Amino acid sequence: MTTLTPTQARRRVAGTDWVALATELDELGSAPTGPLLTPAECRDLAALYEKPELFRTTVDLARHRFGSGEYRYFTHDLPAPVAALRDALYPRLLPVARDWAARLGRPAPWPDSLAEWLERCHAAGQNRSAQILLRYGAGDWNALHRDVFGDLVFPLQVVIGLDEHGTDYTGGEFLMVEQRPRAQSRGTSTVLRQGHGLVFTTRDRPVRSRRGWSAGALRHGVSTVRSGRRHALGLVFHDAT
């Protein structure tokens, strides 16, 4: 397997225009990063799906009526590239998380260190890994949902495309639907570029209103895969109960 060192991960994460990304997050609740993984690294990560010993559980979407397809939660013994990217992304997302909390008048309990934040999650009973490797085949899809696993929630997460859209699969766009106050819902769709990330809100974003700021609730999902096979890596910055 190819390796991604923490230094390499920080360098790649730093290559994104984070000011522009934060602006787009404010507007839509999601925004793309620059390249985070090479095609070879993407293929290696997708191949890990065939190693069940790396995962704590497998979720069959159809069985739970969440859609169709599968995903697996890694154990806490994360593959090096997954751990390196998560560690590199957290400090870049933290200023946005704190800014959103301030605008919404909410507490911002997230410390500077991801390790310290995860310790707080574990102390509160959220001690199961929430890092996800997802696999969808032709006809599979994921219903609109939120990845909230307990009382402690980090408001942003990242999904990284591991296959090439249009070559390895078609369809399977990443979907977000925002429930706007006193208005019709708004939807967006994004094609995940191979090796690129998409930062998106876990549950809501600040929306300016006549009285200041209100929370615009969002859910995310995946449209029907029309052909091929689609893999993605989900990075969540809080652990699960």
Image (spheres, rainbow, N blue to C red):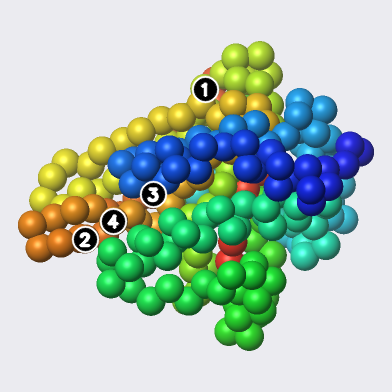
The residue tagged 2 is 214
Q: Earlier in the sequence, mark 1 or mark 2?
A: 1
* Dot 1: element: strand
The residue tagged 4 is 206
Query: Do the residues bearing badges 1 and 2 touch, measured as CB atoms within 8 Å?
Result: no
Q: Is residue 218 visible?
A: yes
Residue 229 left/right relative to 42: left
Circle 4: residue type = Pro
Crowding at mark 1 (Cα within 10 Å: few <14, some 14-19, many 20+): many
Q: Is residue 73 above or below residue 141?
A: below
x and y percentages locating residue 135 in the rendered image: 67, 38
Circle 2: residue type = Ser
Q: Earlier in the sequence, mark 4 or mark 1?
A: 1
Which corner quadrant of the image does residue 86 belong to?
bottom right
> What whole-number distance in Å separates the C-alpha atoms at marks 1 and 2?
33 Å
> What whole-number distance in Å separates the C-alpha atoms at marks 3 and 2?
16 Å
Query: Do the residues bearing badges 3 and 2 touch, measured as CB atoms within 8 Å?
Result: no
Task: Indicate which label's residue lies in the foreground, 4 or 1.
Answer: 4
Which residue is painted at 21% across and 60% down in the image? 214
Which residue is painted at 34% across and 46% down in the image? 26
x and y percentages locating residue 177 in the rendered image: 33, 42
Q: Earlier in the sequence, mark 3 or mark 4?
A: 4
* Dot 4: element: strand
Q: Is residue 167 above or below residue 34?
A: above
Q: Is residue 228 visible?
A: no
Which residue is painted at 20% across and 60% down in the image? 213
Farthest residue, direction right: 1
Crowding at mark 3 (Cα within 10 Å: few <14, some 14-19, many 20+): many
Instruction: Identify the mark at residue 219; answer none if there is no mark.
Output: 3
